[in-house]
Image (spheres, rainbow, N blue to C red):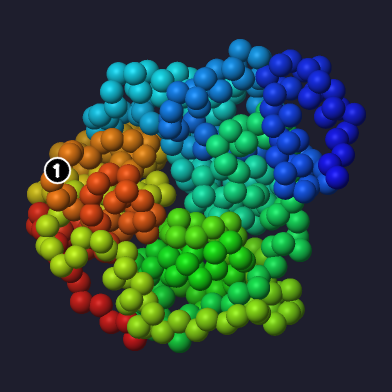
Amino acid sequence: MLELTQDERAIAGGAAGEGAAMAMRIVAEAARLMGAPRLIPIASAHIDGALYHGDSGTLFAEKLVAGGARVGVRASLNVGSLAPAGCAAIRLPPHERDMARRMMRAYEAMGCEPSWTCAPYQAGHRPAQGSDVAWGESNAVVFCNSVLGARTNRYGDFLDIACAIAGRAPDYGLHRPKNRIATLLIDVGGLSRALRSSDVFYPVLGTILGRRAGSDVAVIDGLQGCTTEDRLKALGAAAASAGGVGLFHVAGVTPEAPDRAAALGRLAPRETITLTPNDIATALARLSTAGSTDRVDAVAIGSPHLSLAEIDELERLMAGRKLKAPLYANTGRHVVGPLEAQGRRAALEAAGVIFVVDTCVVVTPILPELEGAVLMTNSGKFAHYAPGNTGYAVTYGSLSECVESAVAGRLVRETRAWS
């Protein structure tokens, strides 16, 4: 049974204003529904609820503002539906555009940081290992838990801002150490090191993880010496899109997994999955929905948002060439700012790159409406959501394949060895 402290009861009763009272009541009711015995203080929040999905979301945020609500902890903002920092044209009708703008301004009025990125952890928001936070956005949640070692559940829209205002979250789920112990072991050690060190592999592995683990916690063994932060980002994003993954461990890499035995809590796994080259090839093929066509109408990268290191790699692969198919580079203002200062954004745009800042092509209408259109991407998350959200069929490939295809204006494949 949930027990609130005297201060929490006072805030819920209106002692700090109606906005704070509404937020505290929402958090308390969520805790009751989840069976949490108490609320716990949080160090920060990441807010996914500022993305426009309908007028009710805007009116909810504006009601909080009218009630004097302000966030009680650091709160960064996920992508919005518009692009105040500038990008490709957004095709929202006037009413939706106005409501989306009002929504974004309301969240800023409550003291949220105008970060507008789905990769806040690469924009300076990196909570300490072991700290409790309330993060929304599935890829950010899994990165926060798995790579940073902070503790959060998958907080949905509107509960995320309520937690940020209250400065508290329900004490359940992944906030509790016992629920962070892995029960599923995925062994990739039998795959070639070249494959395990390739960027194309991680969204594929994430898709397998999401489908096999669901919301269970897994430990992956065999990636030691093969990962980078961007690869772990891609792995977690695909896993969180394909399933309900909120936390995974990588033996010898992530904070709570010095080895696989520690990640498993010194217990035997309930299931062990040993991946083969055929498993990877099959999962790779499933990420593409466009079939055997060589048509590429657009290329989109950056879900989660591109890091500066990934922009560096994009420039290296382009090698000064012009693109025949538009390449949409989705990223945050924390990346575009340095690019503009260095003159690199203008050079990339002159070559055919279209920067999408503060949002992305899958959550707001940017891509042209074309019959039978095909989008190529290196993102497992884009591959999962793009067909339903954009109407484009998807061809999945490596970043190198994406660049070569954009240069050629048609699909270009590399030869891969999966053994």
Direction top: furthest residue = 66
Q: Residue at x 61, y 12 (%)?
A: 66
Which quadrant does the N terminus fall into?
top right
Direction right: furthest residue = 6
Image coords of residue 112 (percent x, y): 57, 27
Q: Is residue 312 above or below residue 167?
A: below
Which quadrant does the C terminus fall into?
bottom left
> Which image quarter: residue 20?
top right
> Which image quarter: residue 136?
top right
Image coords of residue 221 (percent x, y): 55, 78
Q: Is residue 268 visible?
A: yes
Image coords of residue 325 (percent x, y): 13, 49
Question: In the rendered structure, which amino acid carries the disc numbered 1?
Answer: Leu
Give the number of marks.
Answer: 1
What is the secondary structure assignment of the residue under circle 1?
loop
Q: Residue at x 35, y 23 (%)?
A: 96
Q: Nearer the viewer, residue 97 or 84?
A: 97
Describe residue 150's horizontal placement relative to residue 87 as left or right: right
Q: Is residue 338 visible?
A: no
Q: Is residue 197 above or below residue 245?
A: below
Q: Residue at x 31, y 38 (%)?
A: 356
Residue located beneath label 1 in the image? 370
